[in-house]
Image (cartoon, rainbow, N blue to C red):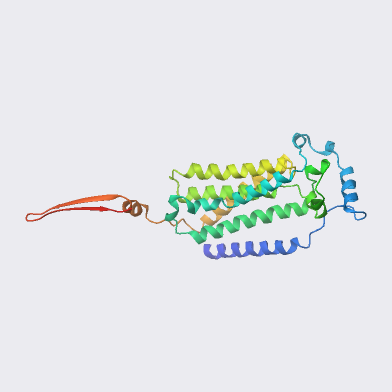
């Protein structure tokens, strides 16, 4: 089987798996919770069975009650993190990239695999969120079963997947760019803030975001590397582009004619 065929089958399998997950998610709406009584009674009953003593000593160091503003802020930062690949096309180096569609498809693979991974883990691992150990837990999150989806942090997984993808791809196309530290630093800063907000808002334990960060970095690294086995970066001629941006002066001296020409290209 040729490399092109292998790449095609890999991508086809990935797309199929992604849509299977989306379809099956609707069948997995219920979480472990009492079946009888009002939602308020069910919440009180579940919280009565939870004890901080059952939480490992590391995670017990930082546990927070639910905070809606910080929850919304975390969602905002994960949205910014997911948009970090825009830096690949927003900086001055971007006009040199020919592989816009290829990079876009690689990013779809990366985000799809990150989403697939975190959903599969959440489907099979039940862990109460930190806010369930405090009074004032949000009833709406309890009703939809989100209270038992603590491990691991999906926001953090998506953020670090995007940050690693952006850093790897930018470094692949522009290894000598002066903007590379800016791209890498900004990408990971957004991901780190997302992780901090997920803990501060009471949605996750520290181990949730640590595992999410490791998973996200792994996915953001592996997908571009696998794609690079079949597709090499295609970059326009930088020397030609640099030449176009420079002023040029030429002098021609002939026996019967003397000419001076000045051209400026921006």
Of residues 12 and 211, which is closer to you in this image?
211
| Left or right, 24 with reference to 217 | right
Percent position (x, y) of residue 107?
57, 56
Instruction: Look at 51% across and 55% down and name the residue there.
Output: 228
Residue extending farthest right: 36
Query: In the picture, residue 241 is in which quadrant?
Result: bottom left
Percent position (x, y) of residue 141?
79, 51
| Left or right, 175 with reference to 194 | left
Instruction: Look at 48% across and 54% down and name the residue there.
Output: 89
Of residues 15 and 9, which is closer to you in this image?
15
Residue extending farthest left: 256
Q: Check the image and report above or below for 106 versus 155.
A: below
Residue extending farthest front: 69
Task: Please tell me how many numbered marks the rendered image carries.
Answer: 0
Percent position (x, y) of residue 236?
40, 56
Percent position (x, y) of residue 52?
83, 37
Query: In the picture, residue 53 is in which quadrant?
Result: top right
Q: Check the image and report above or below for 231 versus 81.
A: below
Instruction: Look at 71% across and 46% down and name the residue there.
Output: 71
Q: Give the quadrant of the N terminus.
A: bottom right
Query: In the picture, residue 17 is in which quadrant?
Result: bottom right
Of residues 166 and 70, which is closer to you in this image?
70
Instruction: Look at 91% across and 50% down and name the residue there.
Output: 41
């Amino acid at each position: 089987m040729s490399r092109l065929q292998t790449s095609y089958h890999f991508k086809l399998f990935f797309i199929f798996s992604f849509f299977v997950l989306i379809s099956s998610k609707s069948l997995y709406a219920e979480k472990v919770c009492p079946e009888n009584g009002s939602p308020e009674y069910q919440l009180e009953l579940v919280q009565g069975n939870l004890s901080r003593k059952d939480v490992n000593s590391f995670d017990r160091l930082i546990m927070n009650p639910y905070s809606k503003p910080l929850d919304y802020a975390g969602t905002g930062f994960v949205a910014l993190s997911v948009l970090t690949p825009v830096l690949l096309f927003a900086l001055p180096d971007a006009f040199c990239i020919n592989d816009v569609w290829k990079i876009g498809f690689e990013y779809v693979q990366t985000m799809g695999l990150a989403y697939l991974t975190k959903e599969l883990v959440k489907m099979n691992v039940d862990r109460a969120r930190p806010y369930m150990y405090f009074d004032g837990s949000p009833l709406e999150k309890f009703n939809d079963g989100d209270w038992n989806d603590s491990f691991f942090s999906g926001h953090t997984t998506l953020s670090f997947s995007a940050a690693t993808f952006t850093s790897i791809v930018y470094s692949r196309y522009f290894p000598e760019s002066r903007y590379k530290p800016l791209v890498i630093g900004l990408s990971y800063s957004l991901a780190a803030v997302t992780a901090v907000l997920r803990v501060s808002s009471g949605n996750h334990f520290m181990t949730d975001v640590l595992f999410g960060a490791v998973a996200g970095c792994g996915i953001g690294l592996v997908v571009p590397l696998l794609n690079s086995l079949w597709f090499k970066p295609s970059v326009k001629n930088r020397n030609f582009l640099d030449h176009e941006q420079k002023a040029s002066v030429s002098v021609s001296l002939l026996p019967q004619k003397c000419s001076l020409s000045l051209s400026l290209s921006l």
